[in-house]
Amino acid sequence: MSSKYMKIMEEIKLRLADGSLIAGSKLPSVRQLSEHFSCSKNTVIKAYEELEKEHLIYSVPKSGYFVVNEFQNAKNENEVIDFLSAGPDKNVMPYLEFQHCINQAIEQYKEALFTYSDQQGLYSLRVQLVKYLENLQVFTQPERVVVVSGSQQALNLLVSMPFLNGKNNILIEQPTYFGFIESINLHQATTFGIELSMEGIDLDRLEYIFRNNDIKFFYIIPRFHNPLGHSYTNSEKKKIVELAEKYDVYIVEDDFLGDLDPNAKSDPLFSFDPSGRVIYIKSFSKIFLPGLRIATVVLPTLMINNFLRYKFSSDFNSSALSQGALEIYLKSGMFNSHLKKIKEVYRTKMQILQEACELLLPANTHCTKPPSGFYLSICLPKNVTAKQLVHMLNEQHIYVDDASRMFLPEYKKENLLRLSISQVNESQIKLGVERLAHCIALIDSRKSHIIPSDSFMGKFI
């Protein structure tokens, strides 16, 4: 039976690939295929069930089977080396497991998932989120948790709303997540920067800014920073919270990759916060399913009503279907199993990337060395701009990110490149770095022939 049902699947996939079956096409009946392939109806049903699991076809009771959408032929996939995409690795996304959770949520909650729901988020989900956050050393109560439509929504709301300290200005690390820079630009918020390297920030400089610049909140990515990959030590985090308390500054902690931390003793800033000074944001987009559009925010009790008012004007409430399915996924223990798997996947990829960079990049090129996470940044020779390199690599189907958009104008660097390991195939990492190194050397040598060597010798970053 096995070989027959696989032959049926191959035949249908061929017809999808050559375009003879398109979106909405009705497939032959079970009886027709069983006669055509001289097999039992059970064999055909088995083939159709497997194609349904791959989301290529779907069944309509009493009507038959139909094509979901155009078949995406992946024959050129191996020609692309993707250091640009920052979503989760497609090979470890738990599609089928979560599909079961969606079905179960619909069965369990029925019409409750398709009407207006609690603006703060399903209470039963918030209970599960509190249990999940305990594993990250974030101890809170469901009443302080708000479910939002992705961390970007939370950040945008926090930029726009007034804070209890009555201050107006925002402080950010430089560089930082470009989505947050977009929000502050759209709201025309007065923003200060503080330089960040793999050695951290200057805490004396931080205190000076807190004391003199009317800072409403400090936006910080404490673990596996985007784009550098930097993580703060516990002592640094404790000091930052103490300074925020001293100068009445709030901290917005974006811990989007905290689950990947291999250091069990590493704590979030929230754990050093005795007074509600730290607003903690945890997204599920990078470690789980981006399309779920679910994140959680832990807020000081006195800020919740105002935050919900601003959220109401944005989307009223986040998707109840996503919330119900996530609740079941967390409660079942599936999420913990998923985390174990992805922690090893990303740690291994990051190790391979770092080894390739150390081995292959030119001596005047420097890279950051995060233990895990998604991001590693490369500081290029001053003769080489990230924009030049991105263009040259694109022509070879190698995709990397120019990090210049992650800076405020006064801090902008044109020679910082961000590499993401989340969606690149393990087997392609070394080849991608080889080609990257070759392009850096090529651009650098061309510039060397134009500019006299004594004008730039020894000035590489």
Image (spheres, rainbow, N blue to C red):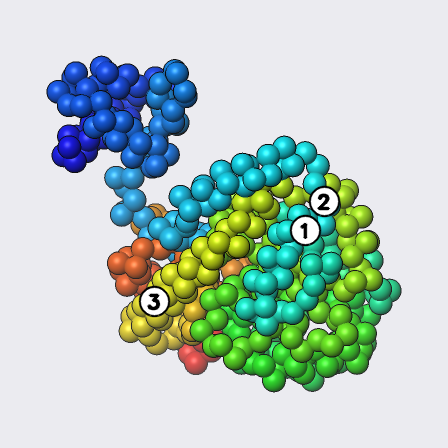
Residue at 29% across, 35% down: 50
Would you name the residue on which mark 2 appears? 118
Mark before the other along the chain sequence, 2 or 1: 2
Q: Amino acid at mark 1?
A: Tyr
Would you name the residue on which mark 3 appears? 348
Determine whether, in the image, residue 112 is placed left or right of residue 392: right
| Residue farthest toward the right in the current orientation of the protein | 166
Q: Secondary structure at mark 2?
A: loop
Q: Nearer the viewer, mark 3 or mark 2?
A: 2
Would you name the residue on which mark 1 appears? 123
Foreground: 289 or 188?
A: 289
Question: Residue 222's spot in the image, x, y percent?
Answer: 58, 71
Q: Are marks 2 and 1 in contact (CB under 8 Å)?
A: yes
Relative to 279, residue 98 above or below: above
Determine whether, in the image, residue 367 is placed left or right of residue 235: left
In which quadrant of the rendered view does residue 302 lie?
A: bottom right
Mark before the other along the chain sequence, 1 or 3: 1
Relative to 247, residue 49 above or below: above
